[in-house]
Amino acid sequence: MADYPKYRSHFVPRTRDGWIATVAFLVLFAIAMPPVTHTLLNRVYPTIFGLPFLYAVLLFVYVALIGVLVWALRRGV
Amino acid sequence: MEPWVVSTSLIFVYLIATVVLGIVANRRMSVDMEDFLLYGRKAGFIVLYLTVVATFHSAFAFLGSGGFFYTHGLGFWAAGTWTVLVGAITYVLGTRIWALGKAFGYITPADMLADFYESESVRVAVAVVSVVFTILYIQVQAQGLGYIINVASGGRISFQLGTFILLAVAAAYLMAGGLRAVYWTDVLQGIWMYLAVWIGALVLSYELFGGPLELWHAVEDVHPELLTLPGPRGFFTPGMWVGMTITLSFGIVFQPHMLIRYYTAVDGRTLKLLGATTPIYLMTLYIPAALVGLGGAVALPGLDVPDTIFPELLFRYSPAWLTGIILAGATAAAMSTLDSILHANMTVLTRDVYQRYIAPERSQAHYVWVGRMIVVALLAVGYVLSVKTFGFLVTLVTLSGSGALQLMPAILGVCFPGGRVLTKDGVLAGLGASMVTLYVTLVVTPHPLGMHGGIWALLVNMVVAVAVSAVTPRPSAETVRRVHGEVERFVYGTEE
């Protein structure tokens, strides 16, 4: 069994850009998940550009998440 | 001209366009399985983009999402989480599946899993899960289509006839041009449904409220309870939010009609670009859906069937031509999912069952012919399931949304080297335990402790798969080196 192949985990980033993209995505994603959604974000006011607070903040977070994916693509992650 | 004539005519114009595309695709097709089943692995960015987004969004996204916003409020804006997650999954996982498919000639998800876990039992189990849990979506989409054409024609075309016509059209272009026809019609469908839902929502918001911002203000004044969580009926609990995010991202991506799309990309860069940009389309489709559902709750409260809010508003407040265009868009949403599921089931049955166990050494033309016959059989099954009422189907449909999610441990085990390798016994035991858990947590005691039943099943699946893998024989070193080595080279350009 000594020659059974072993690889470094693919769940852990190996480059600086990989770490940045992973951490940024996870942090932003956590903002769009409970408990943040059901506590801090769970309100109508103050409205943002006329939109309810919960809706507007989540829209911003979703756009930022897409931005992280596009950044990762441009950096070749 | 009466509104129903305009609406029905536009739907038939749309249907004729899809058949023409199928015929053109047939003339471009060469008679081999990779071309018929996988578009020759040559799908470029635009075609792949539109087929993925059109397939992901079914009739439910078009009609049901408005109903969800109407009933449960802004909680359905969680849609943004699962649509963005689909992009990330495509970026990270889809590219690995593509690389393995290209390197080893995989056509179905079962090809990949059976190869790595060195097990025909795994092939059969994955094929069964793939077919059983997606064939029911044929019924769901076909029923949606029958409903749409029945509504558009003002009841003049029966639900049964409408279902048959639309199923037959989808089967016809699939048989004619294979996956190429599906992809080309999906391009039309993806564009049509996106424009339709946006135009419809904007027209209605201006017609009823004077604009989208005024619509939001009206909802704040009349139904503020729709703008916070967990919604007026308490549906969007934290557990449900997380559960829907996982089941509607991984659960849909792991269905065979989505996994097979990863094999068809022309290169890995195309898939990365796809992953980074598909959430733009997928997420923004729910912006007009929110306008329709929430605006509808103010303008037309008390509907018995909330899913009908979009067509109800259209028939009351928009011109007939626009209603026709939008209902054709709803038809496109359902057909683009239906044709992909028909294709995926045909591919699995042809490749994993017929070619593997019934007639292994036949010509490519023979398998293409068999695939077409399987489509006819699926058409018949889909029609019967759609127009008859079977009690057990209600149970199976309840299970289906979370079924494909249970392939997650097996797929991650292949595509993510590192750590302990899962075994065929671990994968099979995990799948079996998850099916039992699914039945308990979705049917017997739905969503225990407020957590989605699909997540309970996945947790049990992972624990059992890891535990059993710890005490059973691993795949051979040669296979692990070949498959994981390919992933390592593709992702990092290094060896073990």
Image (cartoon, helix red, strand yellow):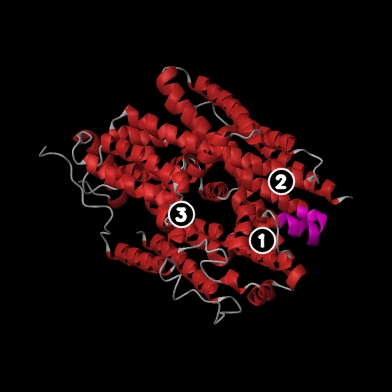
From this viewpoint, which residue is outermost toward the bottom?
A46
For the stretch drawn in magenta, the main secondary structure is: helix
What residue did someone put label 3 on? B86
Say which label, 2 or 3, has the lower sequence index. Answer: 3
Marks 1/3: CA–CA distance: 22 Å
Q: Residues within 10 Å of mark 3 (few under 14, many from 20)?
A: many
Q: Are marks 2 and 3 in contact (CB under 8 Å)?
A: no
Give A13 or A46, whichever is nearer the viewer.
A46
**Nearer to the camera, A24 or B122:** B122
Residue labelled with disc 2:
B148
Q: Nearer the viewer, residue B439 or B479?
A: B439
**Do tag 1 and tag 2 residues touch (Cβ < 8 Å)?**
no
Front: mark 1 or 2: 2
Res B310 label: none
For mark 2, give the secondary structure.
helix
Q: Nearer the viewer, mark 2 or mark 3?
A: 2
- Residue shown at 59% from the left, 69% from the top: B226
Residue placed furthest toward the left: A2
Amino acid carrying mark 1 in the image: Trp
Q: Amino acid at mark 2?
A: Ile
Whichever of callouts 1 and 2 sits on the residue coming sooner in the sequence is 2
The structure residue drawn at horizontal position 35% and vertical position 59%, both measured from the top left corner, is: A77
Q: Position of residue B430 (x, y in %)?
A: 32, 40
Amino acid at circle 3: Val
Tell me which numbered mark, 1 or 3, is placed earlier along the sequence: 3
Crowd around label 1: few <14 · some 14–19 · many ≥20 (10 Å):
many
- Residue A22 in percent (x, y) is at 34, 63
Q: Which residue is mark 1?
A: B198
Magenta stretch: give its range. Answer: B310-323
Q: Are marks 1 and 2 on the same chain?
A: yes
Residue B83 versus residue B466 in the image, above or below: below
Taking the magenta stretch, the answer to whether it contains residue B445 is: no
